Amino acid sequence: MTVDALTIQSYFSKKLGQSVTVDSVRQSFPGISRETWLVKATVSGVPTGYVLRIDPPEGSGGPTSLQFEWQVYSALWGTEIPVAKPLWYADGLPFAQGRPHMVRALVDGSTTVEGLFRDTAEAAQLRRNVAIEAVRKLALVHTFNWRAAALDSFIPAPASTGECWTHELQIWREHWHRFGPIPCPVIEEAFYWLAPLAPHDVPLISLNKGNNGIGEEIWRNTAIVAMSDWELASIGDGVADLFWSQGTLRLIDFDEIVRLYSEATGHAVSPERLAFGNAFTLLKQTICALAFWYRPYHEGRTQRVYALSGRTFIHEIEHRLSRCLGRPLDETWAITRGNEKNLYGELGG
Amino acid sequence: MITTCAKLFSVIRSVLTDQVLTNLEASTWTAANVRASLALLTYLEDLTKNGPKVLLENNATIGAFLSSLGDRNLPWMSAPLLTRCRAALGRQARGDVTLDRLIEENWTLQSLLVDVIRARNYATGAVPDDAFDHALRVCISSTTALDFSITRNASQMPPF
C-alpha cells in the first residue's frame, strides 16, 4: 500500500482544517493508468466519502497529466454532464511522496453493475438498459457546449469539423514519436494508411470522453450518476467514443446503438466515420498500451504486473490492426469486430 | 530445461488458481492482479514451450522482403539503409538463443522496418507505390503474427 489510513487522516485534517477520522480506505479496481483510493471518513462528526486519485510512482499512466484531468472535472462540475464534485488538486507535497493527486467527492454507486454477465432473462434486460444508458450519456457529452465551458483552453481542438480526424491523427502521431518505447512497424504504417482515409463529413466537433462505460463511470443500478476517469478526454469526432467502451456498447446489437446515438445527438453517423473510428481506436489503444502502460516497465521504472501485461494484452489488437493495413475500411470491420468479449468481463468485474 | 520450466509454470498456475484465487473475492483489486499475472504466465510459458523464435529464421516473408528491396529501385531508399537491410539478412541467430538475444534480434528487424517506413513517408515527392506498399504490409502482418511467438496466446487475451 503506497498510502495508508493514518497518512490520509493526517493530510486531510490539515487540508480541511477539521477533525478527520478515516474509517476505511480501499484501492479501486483495476487502476491501470492511475491509483484511485476510496476513502470513507468522519469529518467533524459527519460521515463523508472521498475519492483520492494519485499518479503512480512511475508517473502518469496516460498521455495527459493529472492536472489535465482535474481541469476537466472543474470545467464540467455543475453542468448537465454528471461528474463528482472536484475538491482539490496538489502536487509536490510530503503526502504520497510528492506525487500529483486530486480529491473529489465520493458519489454513491459502483464502477461495475452487479449481475451484468449472468445467463438469465433479467441479466439480458439489464445489459440492454446499461448499454442504452451508456450511449445516451455519451451523446450528452458529445452535444455539450465545450466552448462555453472553455475546455478548449487546455484541450487542443480542431479548426473545423472537416479536420477532426486529421487533428486526432496528428496528436497521436506526436504521442507515439515522443513516447513510443519500442520499434513498431504496425503503428508507423497505420498512420500512413489511415491519413488519406480520414472522413471529412463530421457534423459537429464534440467533447470526447475517451475510455468510457463499465469500469469507468459510477453506476447506480442502471444509471450513470457520475462520469469518471477523464484522462483521455479530447475534442473531435464523438464517434471515437463508441469504440472504447470496455464492451458496454457491445452488450446489445451495435446497429441499435448507432440508431440510438444518432437520435440522441440529432446527427446521422456515416459508415465511413464508423469504420474509421473503429480502425483508429485500434491504433490509439495500441499506442496507449505500449507508450503509456508498458513504457515504465520497459525503462525499469516499475515492476507492476499491469505495466508488463500492457505488452501482452495489446498483442491481439496489434495483430488485428496489422491485418487491416492497406484494406478498404469496410473490409476492416469484420477483422476488428470479431471478439465480443470485454476486459472487465474477462477479469471478473 | 524446458521440462523444468513447464513443471514450474504448472505449479505456479496451480497455486494461484486453486489456492489463491479461490480465497479472494472475484471483483477485488488483488484478484484482478492475480488474473493478470496468470495471463502473463501464459505468455511466458509460450515463450519457453515453443522455443524462442527469431523473426528472420522463422519468417520467410520478411527475409524475402528485405532481399527484394535492392531490386525495387526505390528512389527514397538511401544507400546506407539498403546496406543495413542487406546486413540484417546475414545477422540472423540460429539454434538456441537467450531471451535477451531473441529480443535484440527481433527488435533489430522491427527497427529496420520502421526506418524503411519512415524513409518512404518523409521522402520529398515520393510517388505512391502500391506494389511496394502491399509487400511491406504483408511483411508487417506476418512479422506481427510471429513477434515473440505469442499469436496463439494472444488470441485468448481479452480486448478492451
Image (cartoon, helix red, strand yellow):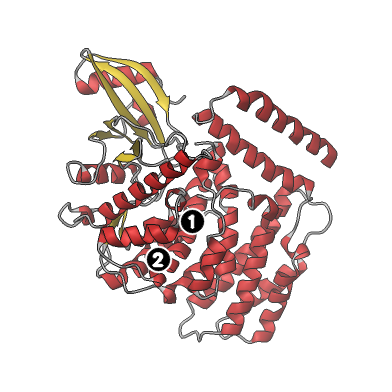
Residue shown at 46% from the left, 71% from the top: A194
Measuring from the top left, give residue B155's x and y in whole percent. Answer: 64, 53
Asked if B32 appears above or below B132 in the picture, the reply is: above
Which amino acid does the dot numbered 1 rest on?
A: Ile
State the image quarter where residue A184 is shown: bottom right
Residue A3 shows up from this direction: no
Q: From this viewpoint, which residue is outermost toward the front?
A: A121
Residue shown at 43% from the left, 77% from the top: A196
Q: From this viewpoint, which residue is outermost toward the left?
A: A148
Residue B89 shows up from this direction: yes
Residue shown at 52% from the left, 52% from the top: A290
* Subunit under mark 2: A
Q: Please tell me whether mark 2 sits on a helix, a strand or a loop.
A: helix
**Whole-number angstrom distance, CA of label 2 to CA of label 1:** 12 Å
Asked whether, in this view, residue B57 is left or right of residue B17, the answer is: right
Label 1 neighbour load within 10 Å: few <14, some 14-19, many 20+: many
Labels 2 and 1 in the same subunit: yes
* Subunit under mark 1: A
Q: Please tell me whether mark 1 sits on a helix, a strand or a loop.
A: helix
Which amino acid does the dot numbered 2 rest on?
A: Leu
Label 2 neighbour load within 10 Å: few <14, some 14-19, many 20+: some
Asked if A165 appears above or below B71 in the picture, the reply is: above
Measuring from the top left, give residue A276's x and y in whole percent. Answer: 43, 68
Instruction: Please tell me the numbered disc located at residue A169.
Output: 2
Query: In this figure, which residue is indicated by the disc labeled 1?
Result: A287
Pick whichever of labels 2 and 1 is earlier in the sequence: 2
Residue shown at 70% from the left, 49% from the top: B100
Instruction: Please tell me the numbered disc located at residue B87.
Output: none
